[in-house]
């Protein structure tokens, strides 16, 4: 059976991607920090789609996490992987110099270093498949600087650029790379980022469900698309960043996010 590995699979978009891949006939390797939440997702996978899910509860901000995941994946899927989903990540809201530096570096380890390390470690396993896929989950924040989400937006811009370059390098191979860039989504992102209730209320007015994001992302992945932004509003807003002067884009973003600081 084809096997997919998903990081950050315990909730939100990661959970929805896991269920979507199980529905498409994939056995799963699910990785996240919370063992209890992973177990709940595994039960959903088994009950709803009759697929197998192997679980690894691990703090993915640790420097050796990628090596541990790769070793575990090789044991669980000796025939190789078909899909790698780099989904784990979080944001931090606030002024750069007022946020805890160590926490920002942890965020960079998860959002930026882990996808690079894990992709590097798992490429040999992906090459074993007749057709392999890598899905990197970025954000519409990747397309612009976002004051008060400064480091988060920069990390997602890196992931988008990494996806584009890697896709080109792997073009002659059997591995396709897709970057999924959602906008506001009804997950725990705002709580984890430390966003206030008023800002989250504004975001919720334009939020998509994790299931809608995941379904659109998987369709884009298996269609071989380079990158995909789900939702018309998100597509338009990201598209405008390429034609509107950057200073104006940043001013608008600051007006939204800094208003509630």
Image (cartoon, rainbow, N blue to C red):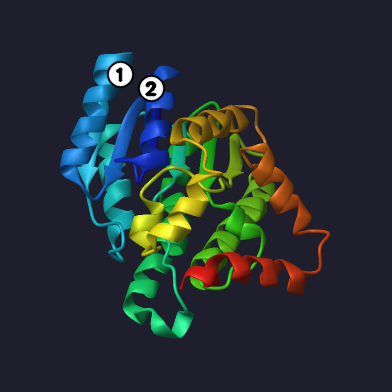
Mark 2 highlights which residue? 22
Q: Secondary structure at mark 2?
A: helix
Q: Secondary structure at mark 1?
A: loop
Q: Residue at x 73, y 46 (%)?
A: 236
Instruction: Look at the picture and state if 160 lies above or below 74.
Output: below
Is 95 situated left or right of 197 in this image? right
The mark nearer the N terminus, 1 or 2, is: 2
In the rendered image, the residue lying farthest to the bottom is 97
Q: Residue at x 57, y 73 (%)?
A: 147
Q: Residue at x 62, y 32 (%)?
A: 220
Q: How many marks?
A: 2
Instruction: Look at the picture and state if 160 lies above or below 171.
Output: below
Estimate the spatial distance between the alpha carbons at disc 1 and disc 2, rounded to whole Å: 6 Å
Q: Residues within 10 Å of mark 2 (few under 14, many from 20)?
A: many
Where is residue 92? Give x, y as percent: 41, 67
**Label of residue 199 in the image:** none
Quadrant hosting residue 156: bottom right
Instruction: Look at the picture and state if 152 lies above or below 170.
Output: below
Where is residue 96? Give x, y as percent: 47, 80
Is 134 situated left or right of 228 in this image? left
Q: Residue at x 76, y 51 (%)?
A: 239
Is 178 situated left or right of 10 in this image? right
Asked if the residue under mark 2 is in contact with the one under mark 1, i.e. CB atoms within 8 Å, the reply is: yes
Is residue 162 in sight in this rendering? Answer: no
The front one of 112 and 234 is 234
Mark 1 highlights which residue? 51
Quadrant hosting residue 195: bottom left
Q: Residues within 10 Å of mark 1 (few under 14, many from 20)?
A: many
The front one of 95 and 45 is 95
């Amino acid at each position: 059976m084809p096997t997919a590995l998903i990081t950050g699979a315990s909730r939100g978009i990661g959970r929805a991607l896991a269920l979507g891949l199980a529905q498409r006939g994939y056995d799963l390797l699910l990785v996240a920090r919370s063992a209890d939440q992973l177990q709940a997702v595994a039960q959903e996978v088994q009950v709803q789609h009759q697929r197998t899910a192997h679980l690894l509860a691990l703090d993915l901000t640790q420097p050796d996490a990628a090596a541990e995941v790769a070793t575990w994946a090789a044991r669980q899927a000796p025939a190789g992987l078909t899909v790698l989903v780099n989904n784990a990540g979080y944001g931090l809201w606030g002024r750069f110099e007022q946020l805890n530096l160590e926490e920002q570096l942890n965020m960079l380890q998860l959002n930026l270093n882990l996808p690079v390390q894990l992709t590097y470690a798992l490429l040999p396993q992906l090459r074993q498949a007749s057709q392999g896929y890598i899905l990197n989950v970025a954000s519409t924040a990747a397309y612009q600087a976002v004051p008060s989400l400064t480091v988060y937006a920069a990390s997602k811009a890196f992931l988008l650029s990494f996806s584009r370059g890697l896709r080109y390098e792997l073009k002659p191979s059997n591995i396709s790379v897709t970057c999924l860039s959602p906008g506001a989504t009804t997950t725990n992102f705002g709580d984890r980022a430390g966003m206030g209730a008023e800002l989250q209320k504004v975001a919720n007015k334009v939020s998509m469900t994790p299931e809608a994001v995941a379904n659109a992302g998987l369709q884009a992945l298996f269609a071989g698309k380079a990158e995909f932004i789900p939702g018309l509003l998100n597509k338009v807003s990201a598209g405008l960043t390429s034609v509107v002067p950057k200073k104006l884009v940043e001013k608008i973003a600051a007006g939204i996010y800094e208003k509630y600081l």
